[in-house]
Amino acid sequence: MCLLLGAAGVGKTLLVKRLQNILRGPARGQGRGRAGGGPGSRGPARGPPSAALASLTLAQLSSQDGPGDLGEPPPTRPTVGTNLTDVVAPRRITIRELGGCMSPIWSSYFGSCHSLMFMIDASNPAQLSASCVHLLGLLSAEQLSQVSVLILFNKIDLPCYMTIEEMKSLIRLPDIIAGAKQSISTAEISARKGTGLAQVLHWLQEQHRSGG
């Protein structure tokens, strides 16, 4: 299980939909409710791709910097509660996305977590301090002390008066990574255009070689 966390509106749902559509991952059932007051959802079932197809998809994504064959972004709506989505890369990986409004009870879902993706809106520096507080809380959680973490700077396709490096410096990200118990990676992505998704898929593959 991979947890996907971040403030409301950072692009978590779009990322999951992009990954699922790219890999044609299987998804079972609809509207599975979860503690926290919101509906969970899994899209229509699809057949799993072969390892060769998953590798080809990664190669194609790595060679492009823009929407390419991804097409227009699928419609999304704010997550209230939790969404469960299966992607196959080529092993089935379950991503549990939790709504930003659920941050007070995120810890209720730490137990089954094998890896963690934390998303930051790179187009909104005003949200940085709140995101940093959330990140520090996650990294200090004992249940997450052994998980691998991928920090995603999303929306790099949008204009911003600060660079990613300036944002990392502002929240002292190098110091946070150096002092954390977890293995932490970072990625700069655009879920809307598809930029950086190959790196996300590769990270998921590496972290979930032995199971979902």
Image (spheres, rainbow, N blue to C red):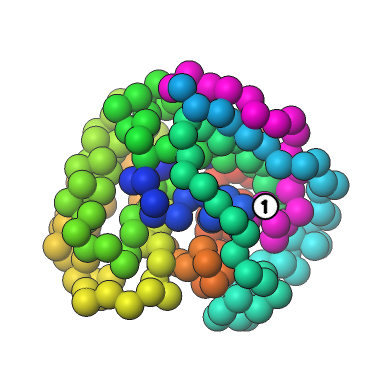
Is most of the magenta stretch helix, strand or loop? loop
Q: Can residue 20 be found in the magenta stretch?
A: yes
Pick whichever, 90 or 96, lies toward us.
Answer: 96
Q: Mark 1 is on which residue type?
A: Gln
- Residue 3, how many percent across, how many down? 48, 38
Q: Is residue 212 visible?
A: no
- Residue 63, how many percent across, how many down? 62, 80
Quarter occupied by the C terminus: top right
Residue 144 drawn above or below residue 6: above
Instruction: Using a 10 Å C-alpha cutoff, classify the residue at mark 1 as few (fewer than 14 neighbours), some (14 to 19) or many (20 or more).
Output: many
Q: Residue at x 80, y 41 (%)?
A: 45
- In magenta, the rendered stretch is 19-36
Q: Residue at x 63, y 40 (%)?
A: 85
- Residue 68, how many percent across, how many down? 65, 78
Q: Can residue 7 be found in the magenta stretch?
A: no
Q: Residue at x 34, y 46 (%)?
A: 7
Quarter occupied by the N terminus: top right
Write down the residue under mark 1: 20
- Residue 15, how many percent across, how many down? 54, 55
Residue 152 drawn above or below residue 147: below
Pick whichever, 135 or 78, lies toward us.
Answer: 78
Disc 1 on helix, strand or loop? helix
